[in-house]
Amino acid sequence: MSLSMDLLERARKVIPGGVNSSVRKIKPILGWKTAKGAYMWDMDGNKYVDLNASWASCILGHRYDEVDDAVIAAIKDCDLIGLGVTTYEVELAEKIVENFPCADRVLFSTCGSEATYHAIRLSRAATGRNKIIKFQGGYHGWHDYVLRNTYNKKETLYTRDLGSKGMLDSVVDETIICRFNDLEDVESKIRANPEQIAAIIAEPVAYNLGGVRLQDEFLKGLRRLCDANGILLIFDEVITGVRVGMHGYQGICGVTPDLCTIGKGIGNTYPVAVTAGKAEYMDMFNTTEKGTVFFGGTFNAGPFVMAACLKTMEILERENVHQYLFDLGDYLRNGMNEIFKRQGYEAEMAGYASISIPVFGKGPFTCQDDLHETDMKAAIEFRKGLVKRGYYIVPADVKRLCLMYSHTKEDIDGLFQVAEDTLKEMKRNKI
Ligand code: PMP
């Protein structure tokens, strides 16, 4: 028995399934000892190049010294008081307001699901309407407002697919599902539900769906439809937030939402999320004197987490990390696409910026329907082959391959080698 298995067995006696998030049960389940920079080590001392990057929340690298030093300094300065306000949170809020086009005001919470929940509830209060639109395959967190139609099988696309037992029917039915990049679909759903839709929520680069990029015209169309119909546009930038640039994807596509959420990478693994948006809406939260939309959270805006974010943003800006990540992402995708071709696979490394996804099929991929036409079985075998060879990409369907600032060109060259070996093995096994 390995030390990993020993730990898992012990864990299973006290933690349901032995893991603390359902995605962590994707096999192989390993026990982890530590991680540093772009690498992680399991309990048995095996080293992996980390291509999951803590589900995109690690943007610089693991245990990044400068960030950790800022965190330690903050802890020594002030822990969580949870009353009033500290300099840390003001500085970070100012930084976000300065950078994100839609952000006049900012509120901090501890995870992305909270941030999307707050944004949606606020949109309901602001419009006096109940329904929201989300897209098939979009993921915005674990709560009842948004969990439906996320991880569908091909047969259940666009059906009433809940995602969890225990969700309230009445809530689920207020969430309308549309097809990504299909403006006519959105338009017809709005027409069918006149003056009932409070918000449209979308991840502007659908990194939870193979990095499907929302076309500029589609995003502009969403803005137009929202304006014409009194609907709030919410960009879920929990991943894209600081991953694609200092101003989020809203700063790239030129479409400004009413509200946005930011999370993951902004804290370089420290737990944080942001709900931000236009003052006329954000001032409705009851953190203001007259606000009527509840906002709370014991751990919100803890100084050490704010310090992690401030330092992470400082490094991203100072060292032009985004350019590095864009270039490394292009290098990875171009190299992998050549390898797929050389090995005779109709496959491509899709994606954008620092996040990619190996898809065994022919693009373009514009929605979940397209991805379901690809060979998922081959994709999973490919991923398993990489893991076996020390390159950890989650071995399941469309999960992300995510780069960090700590990854080097040599890491990617190493990936090319193991990818080619894996494809050769797959060919031998007729996959
Ligand atoms: N929105 C998006 C776009 C996400 O990718 C995630 C997490 N994968 C969430 C919301 C939820 O964030 P959290 O897991 O921190 O609750």
Image (tube, grey):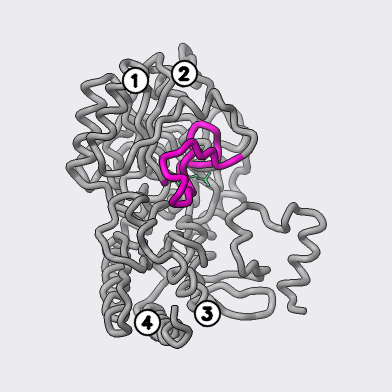
- Spot the residue most to the left: 217
Q: Amino acid at mark 2?
A: Thr
Q: Amino acid at mark 3?
A: Gly
Please tell me how crowded label 1 is: few (under 14), some (14-19), or many (20+) other residues with Cα within 10 Å: few
Counting from the top left corner in percent of width and height, residue 212 is at 32, 53
183 inside magenta stretch? no
159 inside magenta stretch? yes
Q: CA distance from mark 4 to mark 3?
A: 12 Å
**Visible in this render: residue 91?**
no
Front of the two marks 1 and 2 = 1
List the residue tagged with mark 4: 416
Task: Pick the residue in front: 4 or 194.
Answer: 194
Q: Residue 407 sits in which quadrant? A: bottom left
List the residue tagged with mark 1: 193
Q: CA distance from mark 4 to mark 2?
A: 53 Å
Task: Pick the residue in front: 237 or 15.
Answer: 15
Q: Which residues are magenta?
A: 137-164
List the residue tagged with mark 2: 288
Q: Amino acid at mark 1?
A: Asn
Left or right position of 124 against 2: left
- Find residue 390 and name its label: 3
Front of the two marks 1 and 3 = 1
Left or right position of 203 against 183: right
Q: Secondary structure at mark 4?
A: helix
Q: Earlier in the sequence, mark 1 or mark 2?
A: 1
Q: Earlier in the sequence, mark 4 or mark 2?
A: 2
Q: Earlier in the sequence, mark 1 or mark 4?
A: 1
